[in-house]
């Protein structure tokens, strides 16, 4: 699991690969905290290369979404594989988190 | 008296040099002046073993000792035996006459880390000091990670005991139904629980839940989830209202943003009617006596604990005689084999094609066994939990 950051204007695009589960969720959380800068106006998590996410990983996404909301930073996730999307749908978090099919639509949604 | 070099900084390695030779002190300060000035070394001097022990006892910051062997009052070999009693993490280097293998061997046997010989070669002394300091840094790091591991293991043991403690020890027995549940805990990560509660008019409440995260905080969250669920189950009728109430209570004061997915169902054994509400959990599986099965639709509820004021929709079915309802956690559907494949719903449904339903207990065991066989040697990353309700007859 690695988090790679790129920027499009004031929008941070963070990509994660591999699996996020109970064994590395804290690592994932710390890595996200490290790449998000106070100057970012929007944060997009691109999950194109994410193969699996567990409930511990979902919690990190929820926490990040909450932090971003508090900081008035727009937040979205995009490019979910079918199985990762299923995890969001089953948990009902697709109703709380802004999910997009690809990076482009996510970018236009957060106004980047 | 012990004296100390002046130009040292606080994060320098503090080295105690013990020698009765008065010329050694200025010599060391002169030869090691670069490292002293750079703030890497700080030297403290003592002139025999007694003085050295006084220094070690009064100054807790000494990292290593360089000691001569032949000294008045207390010699270096006796000092070596005493040092671990003051601080077992201090490493010692002994200074001996060239070729004095007998004393060197005694010193090593008494725990000296290394030795240098007289006349002192300062370059060699510095290399030896560096090697000793490197060893000590590694040693300290190893000690710290061992402490962390022990703390982590203790925490996981406590969490595991809490988890095991809240699972039902026995299952209600009644006319027309059988119920049986089991959990196969993951070694390090866990958060599943299930419950079976007897309600008024012989009805049964069934719950399977999965708490996000691990460790003691997750176990405590699990415990309050289970208690709140039980309270709401007894106090309220409709599954949707039960989840709504538990969600509101869990959301209060949930700074850590933990959540729990819950499938909650109420079963009437007389009519076979079953009403369920799904709070972000896997869909239940309805299995018929002929081995066919269907996944029951999600009621669209969000996992409990993250957002207050949510309403939970319900759905109802009727279990025919001979039908079984399978409640499970993602530890079943997402169990992984060595090829990285997931167990999945198809394999779960396939179990009942192969093995017709017999009893709730045997069905439960067949499911856990199939997951176990599928995963093989792959480490189990999540709890595997399954609760089976079977309507008898037919």
Image (spheres, rainbow, N blue to C red):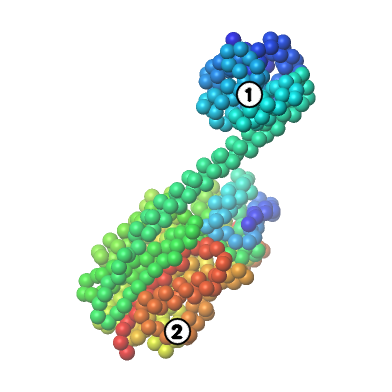
Give the mark nearer the N terminus: 1 vs 2: 1
Q: Which residue is mark 2?
A: B355
Q: Which mark is residue B247?
A: none
Q: Residues within 10 Å of mark 1 (few under 14, many from 20)?
A: many
* Position of residue B267 in the picture relative to residue A61 (left or right): left
- For label 1, the SS is strand
Question: Which chain is indicated by disc 1?
Answer: B
Residue situated in front as seen by the camera: B118 or B89:
B118
Q: Quadrant of residue B265?
A: bottom left
Q: Which residue is mark 1?
A: B65
Residue situated in front as seen by the camera: B119 or B337:
B119
Q: Which image quadrant: the C terminus of chain A?
A: bottom right
Q: Which image quadrant: the N terminus of chain A?
A: bottom right
Query: In the image, residue B258 lies at what x, y percent?
Result: 44, 55
> Residue at coordinates 34% horizontally, 59% vertically from top-left?
B166
* Position of residue B159 in the picture relative to residue B321 (left or right): right
Q: Quadrant of residue B33?
A: top right
């Amino acid at each position: 699991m690695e988090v790679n950051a790129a920027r499009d204007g004031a929008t941070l695009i963070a990509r994660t690969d591999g699996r996020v589960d109970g064994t590395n969720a804290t690592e994932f959380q710390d890595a996200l905290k490290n790449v998000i800068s106070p100057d970012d106006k929007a944060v997009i998590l691109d999950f194109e290369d994410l193969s699996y996410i567990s409930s511990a990983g979902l919690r990190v996404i929820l926490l990040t979404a909450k932090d971003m909301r508090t900081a008035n930073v727009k937040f979205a996730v995009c490019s979910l594989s079918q199985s990762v999307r299923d995890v969001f749908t089953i948990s009902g978090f697709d109703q709380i988190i802004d999910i997009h099919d690809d990076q482009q639509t996510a970018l236009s949604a957060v106004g980047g | 008296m012990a004296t100390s070099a002046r130009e040292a900084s606080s994060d320098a390695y503090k080295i105690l040099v013990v020698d009765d030779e008065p010329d050694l002190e200025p010599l060391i300060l002169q030869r090691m002046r670069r490292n002293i000035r750079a703030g890497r070394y700080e030297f403290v001097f003592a002139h025999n073993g007694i003085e050295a022990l006084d220094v070690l006892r009064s100054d807790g910051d000494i990292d290593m000792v360089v000691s001569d062997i032949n000294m008045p009052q207390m010699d270096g070999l006796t000092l070596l035996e005493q040092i671990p009693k003051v601080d077992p993490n201090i490493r010692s280097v002994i200074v001996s006459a060239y070729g004095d293998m007998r004393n060197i061997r005694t010193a090593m046997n008494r725990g000296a880390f290394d030795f240098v010989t007289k006349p002192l070669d300062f370059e060699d002394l510095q290399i030896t000091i560096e090697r000793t300091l490197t060893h000590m840094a590694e040693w300290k790091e190893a000690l710290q990670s061992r402490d962390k591991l022990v703390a982590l293991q203790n925490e996981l043991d406590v969490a595991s005991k809490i988890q095991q403690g809240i699972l039902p020890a026995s299952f209600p027995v009644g006319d027309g139904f059988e119920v049986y549940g089991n959990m196969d805990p993951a070694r390090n990560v866990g958060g599943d629980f299930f419950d079976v509660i007897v309600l008024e008019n012989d009805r049964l409440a069934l719950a399977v839940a999965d708490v996000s995260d691990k460790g003691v905080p997750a176990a405590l969250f699990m415990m309050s989830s289970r208690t709140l669920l039980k309270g709401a189950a007894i106090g309220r009728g409709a599954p949707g209202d039960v989840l709504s109430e538990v969600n509101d209570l869990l959301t209060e004061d949930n700074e850590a943003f933990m959540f729990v997915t819950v499938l909650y169902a109420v079963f009437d054994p007389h009519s076979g009617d079953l009403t369920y509400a799904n709070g972000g959990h896997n869909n239940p599986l309805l299995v018929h006596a002929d081995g066919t099965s269907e996944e029951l639709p999600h009621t669209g509820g969000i996992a409990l604990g993250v957002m207050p004021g949510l309403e939970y929709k319900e759905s109802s079915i009727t279990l025919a005689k001979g039908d079984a309802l399978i409640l499970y956690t993602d530890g079943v559907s997402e169990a992984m084999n060595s090829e990285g494949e997931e167990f999945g719903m198809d394999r779960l449904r396939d179990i009942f094609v192969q093995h017709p339903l017999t009893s709730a207990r045997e069905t439960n065991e067949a499911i856990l066994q199939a997951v176990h066989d599928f995963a093989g040697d792959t480490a189990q990353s999540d709890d595997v939990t399954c609760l089976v309700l079977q309507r008898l007859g037919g």
